[in-house]
Amino acid sequence: MSRLRFGLRLKLLFFSSFLLTIPWLGYQYVWEMETYLRIGQEQTMVGTARAVATALHERPALFDSQSGYLTDVRPGTDLYAHKIAYPIQLDGKLDDWQDYRHLAIAYGQQNLIDPIQDYQLDSLHFKHMVGQYDRFLYAMFDVTDNNVLLRPSNSLRIDKNDHLQIAMTDKNALFQRYIIAPSQPGWVNAYLLKDDLDSLQPERLETKIQGQWRNTSSGYQLELRFPLAMMSSKIAFAIVDVDDSQTRAVEHIMGTANPSQLDSLGTVLVPSPEIEKILKGLKYSNARVWVVDKHMRVLARSGNIQRASGVQSGLLSNTDPNQQSSWWKYIENNWLLPLYYQILTKPPADFVDDLRDAFALQGQDISQALNGTPSSLWRLSSDNKAVIMSAAHPIYIDETVMGAVVVEQTTNGIRTLRNKALEQQFHYILLVILISTLALFLIASRISWRIRKLRNETESAIDQQGKIIGNIIPSTTRDEIGDLSRTFTHVLSRLSQYNTYLENMSSRLSHELRTPVAIVNSSLDILLLEEQNPEKKQYVDRAKQGITRLSKILSNMSEATRLEQAIENNDRETFDLDELLKGCVAGYRLAYASRKFDVQVSVSNSTFHGAPELFAQMLDKIIANAVEFSEDNSAINLQMVNSDQGYVLTIANQGNLLPENMQHQLLDSMVSVRKQQNTEQPHLGLGLYIAKIIAQYHQGDIRIDNLKDKSGVVVTLMFKD
């Protein structure tokens, strides 16, 4: 009866199944609860928006008679009076506008009125905005003017200098024009112009329009204030630039609209105080409420989105004081909850409200509401910290949509409730995690130890040259790792036998063939001594050449084995590399008279520790290879220099290039790229392999590459000091 096999995969699958309950519980609980809570919050907000819109239906007096009924809003011409938190000090310094400067509008060439001559940016441009505080309208102008020209103190004309023109309609729809033209920086009032549109003559001083003019290094700054009761919603501001003090001719007129034409005036939208009174009580509704006109401009708002969490804070607190002092609560607050909130996300205490100073809103929900369909929308705050839900409902006047009510809340309350519930669930989840993690940790540790043990045994069984020098102890465990260990042991044993056979094959083959080769060779020698006719002698000579080549092949086959044995029994000694190189080169010049040899040694100390006979044998193999692959009368260059690690010896020859895909294989045994028709000498591809063995014996590295100029081949030898 075979034993039950409890495999590794079955073990991990069994213990991992416990962890499957954790994501399932978390996923089901979080999404089910949060989805229903969000749906409920969405319906509540839509109902709130509908209730507020009901209070605003069919009340046309709440909407401005001009700007609220515009068919189109012209940016820069139709202005918006931003709500100002504190009254502006009229000192011309614009410091009080600092929090609102990002709302200012830049005016340039596109805002020129009846261009008089070619425009240059440095000559005139300005930034402008209007704001509302209490019963006053404030305006600021930051003007860049390359030449500020004020009114002469004795001049009766107020239009032959830099000045500001203001045009508006009063409460009785009468067209009124004003000019501010000071004779010196400081406190200014406006001049009311006569009714003649072709005249700029002042009628009287209008002290209700007050301000401060201050010159700057780049132009001037102007702050104004006048009562909202002076005007209806139509207004225009225009800066008039005069640069020539002699001709006093107008250079440019730039403004929000043409102040000389009633039909071209723009509008200014002032947030409705009546609507704000209606919304005032909604600040306790835990939501932010907006009222916008049909152009999405803000008419009124109430509430703070930072506190609009959607859930009353009293529902989120723990009402059991006895649990606060218990030992379990101490562990929960100081140990468990900090751990849980590495996964859970707390609602942000503060987030960026990109609509804090908004004077116009955008969004698909508002667009649908202005088309007559109530809608809602989810969005992220600009810093991605909070999820904000908005619901919009249309406001009808005479069956026409004149605006919309927008109610906003965050999901922070829902997220807090979700976290409170998950805190309780995580107590049970943590217990499952601890048990499963401990079991998996023990199994993983055991597996890891066994794999590392098998890896270490495998690495120690084979050396860097690929020789098998050890064994792997087979495991008795009946799982996948045990099977792998036993398979490795079996494979290693078979490879060891095969490698032993290969290592001994050349010497055995050489030994077995030498006797018949010697018999054939001696027989041929006897035949050569006998007198033969020329035809038979030719065949005997060919047989003699073949047996000679066969003898050389047998010698080459056993050369590598003999070399390894010689290396093992060789003693190292200290010798001079410079003398060895020059001595070898002198011999090469005699042996290879058809080649030119050039040797250059540029080292500070040529003393080397090794085997000079083996080093010379290595050079012989490399030089023989270089001679065979070079042309007659070509040069073979030997150069030795110092490097950071030791010596670098290069041997370069001109001739055939190496194949690109064979450069890293030529140093292996039995590899050759010689042409098959070259049969003068027998080659088994052992020359560079023997050179590699000798280089490694001297703790060196050998590399063979094509020259950079593609003219030949270079062999590089690197040795440590």
Image (cartoon, rainbow, N blue to C red):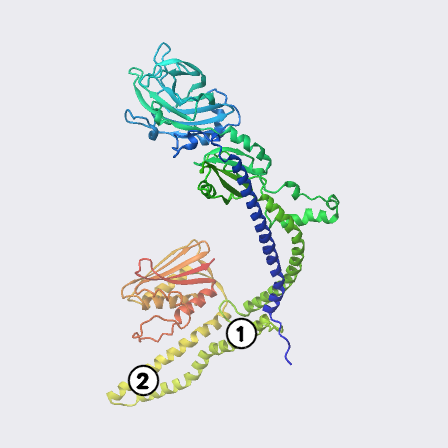
Q: Nearer the viewer, mark 1 or mark 2?
A: 1
Query: Does residue 140 appear left or right of residue 530 in this picture?
Result: right
Q: CA distance from mark 1 to mark 2?
A: 45 Å
- Note whether residue 227 is visible: no
Residue 543 — which label?
2
| Relative depth, front residue between 216 and 101 | 101
Mark 2 neighbour class, 10 Å CA radius: few under 14, some 14 to 19, many 20 or more: some
Q: Residue furthest front?
A: 398
Where, by quadrant of the figure, is residue 370 drawn?
top left
Residue 402 in picture, x, y percent from top left: 45, 36
Where, by quadrant of the figure, is residue 269 drawn?
top left
Query: Does residue 319 appear left or right of residue 601 in this picture?
Result: right
| Relative depth, front residue between 226 and 452 | 226
Q: Which residue corresponds to mark 1? A: 492
| Relative depth, front residue between 113 and 457 | 113
Q: Amino acid at mark 2?
A: Ala
Q: Does 338 sit above or below residue 303?
A: below
Q: Does 478 sit above or below residue 58?
A: below
Count of residue discs: 2
- Note whether residue 417 is visible: yes
Residue 324 in picture, x, y percent from top left: 73, 44
Residue 299 in picture, x, y percent from top left: 48, 32
Q: Residue at x 56, y 72 (%)?
A: 484
Q: Could you say whether the residue bearing mark 1 is in a helix, strand or loop?
A: helix
Residue 520 in picture, x, y percent from top left: 36, 87
Query: Does residue 252 appear left or right of residue 436 in this picture?
Result: left
